[in-house]
Each structure stands twice: as C-alpha cells, then as structure tokens.
Amino acid sequence: MTVIAFASSKGGAGKTTGCIALASELARQGKEKNIGVCLIDADPNQHSAKWALKDGCPDNIFLVQNSTEETILDDIDQASEKYGFVLVDLEGTASLAVAHAISRSSLVIAPCQGSQDDADEAVKTIKLIKRQSKALNREIPFSVLFTRTNPAITPRTLKFIMNEFKEAGIDSFEVSLIDREAFRAVRSFGGTVNDLNPKEVSGIEKAAENAFSFAEEVKWKIKNSVELKAVANG
Ligand SMILES: Nc1ncnc2c1ncn2[C@@H]1O[C@H](COP(=O)(O)OP(=O)(O)O)[C@@H](O)[C@H]1O
Ligand SMILES: [Mg+2]
C-alpha cells in the first residue's frame, strides 16, 4: 500500500544505503505481523538487488530486479497490492523511470550529503517531484534525508545547507543517516545491521538505532500526510 521512492539525480547520495536500511528495519518490524516489504531495484547498476540476493536477506523482503521505464508502473502497482511496503531504489539520473516511480509514491526520499553539489541535485529532484505533482494534480510528499553525517559534529557547510532548505520551505528529516561502517558492511556481507558480528564491525547497535529512528520518522511522515489529505478533503 505504501510506496516509498529514493530519488536523487546524484550518484552516491545514499539512495541504496537508505533503501536497504529502511527495507531491513521495516522487515524486522513486520516479521511477526506477516508484513512483507517489496524492494524494487530500478537502477541499471542493480546495487540493492545484489544485496537482496545475498544470504541473510530477511525472508519477508521480496525483490523485483531490473525494473525499467517500461515495467516500473506495473511493478509498483502489482507490489502495492501484495505487500505492506514497496520501496523503490532509483538510478542517479532524472529519467522517465524516476518520474514514473515518483508519480506512484506515498513519500519520496531525497538523500543528500553535506556538500553543495548534493544539495543542488536534491533541489533538482524536488523540482521534478513538484512537476509530477502538478501534472497529476495531487500532492506528492517528499523529504530530504541527510546522509553520511558525522554523529559528533555538524560541519558548517551542512548547517548552511540545512538552513537553506528550511528557508526555502523544503521538508527534511530530523533524523539523518549517520556514516557507519555497519551500513557499508551489509552491502558486502549481506543481511542486516542486526545480523553483523560486533567482533568484526563497529557501531552495530548505533546503526540499528539509527535505522529504527529513520523508519519511525518515515512512518510518521506518511501517516501525517495521509491525515492532512483527509482534513483537506473534508
Ligand atoms: N550512512 C552511510 N554510512 C556509511 N557509508 C555510506 C552511508 N551512505 C552511503 N554510504 C556509502 O557511500 C557510497 C554511495 O552510497 P549509495 O547508497 O550507494 O548511493 P546511491 O545509491 O545514491 O548512488 C557507498 O559506497 C555506500 O557504502
Ligand atoms: Mg544506488
């Protein structure tokens, strides 16, 4: 029912890492309740698919590989009927597949690292979301997710960028995705941050807490936008 797309025209912004962290956490929370998470990989590089095909991927994560501009709408619609959450990992360009995924989203997450280039690309993505909103005549909620942040300090550039978004009225997540070895490690070893060996990888618990807070804020944003829509519709 709930479709969440990770979009940013910049490669390396943190789309795949965020997508895997969120899929893993939603799957962990949904396991007992039999809630499935569909992961649609629409990036030709297939990075999230490579992760999902490794041993240790939660068995309530269902992968759709090689989604393209021709198939993505059907892939999303079919998955929405079957699974509690549909997560779409997109390529780092503004393509028709990206526009299609945005058009079906309950929430678009635009990951952004603390550099001006990333911020400029996030703004481009937001403009695309706004154009899609206009074309479809419906609100498409979106939010910027700051990624690879430092848990100890917020550098001056990042503070500047955060403030620029705020002043432009662009919503961003309170939670950021912190730069953690654990988020990198799952991409190599498979499974989720909760499955990593603390003797081999540092900061596992902190990464798991970070993924939990991120998922909570995602759910909160989706719930809020649904409630706002209900109020708007009377
Ligand atoms: N929160 C994070 N902690 C550690 N490494 C990260 C984090 N986010 C991204 N990375 C690393 O940065 C690189 C690019 O991230 P990725 O998620 O693949 O970006 P995108 O999918 O937007 O191209 C990858 O090597 C990834 O491991
Ligand atoms: Mg990627």
Image (cartoon, rainbow, N blue to C red):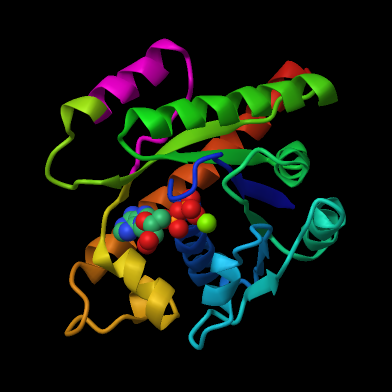
- 226 vs 100, nearest the viewer: 100
Q: Is-magenta flag for residue 173?
A: yes
- Looking at the image, residue 41 sits to the left or right of residue 71; the answer is left
Q: Please state which of residues 65 and 153 is positioned toward the viewer in this rendering.
A: 65
Q: Percent x, y for residue 88?
A: 65, 54
Q: Residue furthest top?
A: 167
Q: For the point 33% across and 73% down, which residue is it? A: 185
Can residue 137 be seen at all in this image of the molecule?
no
Q: Quadrant of the image for the C terminus?
A: top right
Q: Residue furthest bottom?
A: 55
Q: Is residue 124 visible?
A: yes
x and y percentages locating residue 181 in the rendered image = 25, 66
Q: Is residue 65 magenta?
A: no
Position of residue 94 relative to residue 4, above or below, is above
Residue at point 49%, 31% (across, down): 121
Q: Residue at x 56, y 26 (%)?
A: 124
| Vertical position of residue 195 compared to residue 176: above or below | below
Query: Outermost residue, left direction?
Result: 152
Question: With respect to residue 1, does 57 lie above or below?
Answer: below
Residue 21, given in percent of the width and then of the height, sits at 45, 61
Region in magenta:
158-176
Picture layout, residue 159 above or below residue 187: above
Q: Is residue 203 left or right of residue 148?
A: left
The quarter holding residue 206 reads: bottom left
Quadrant hosting residue 71? bottom right
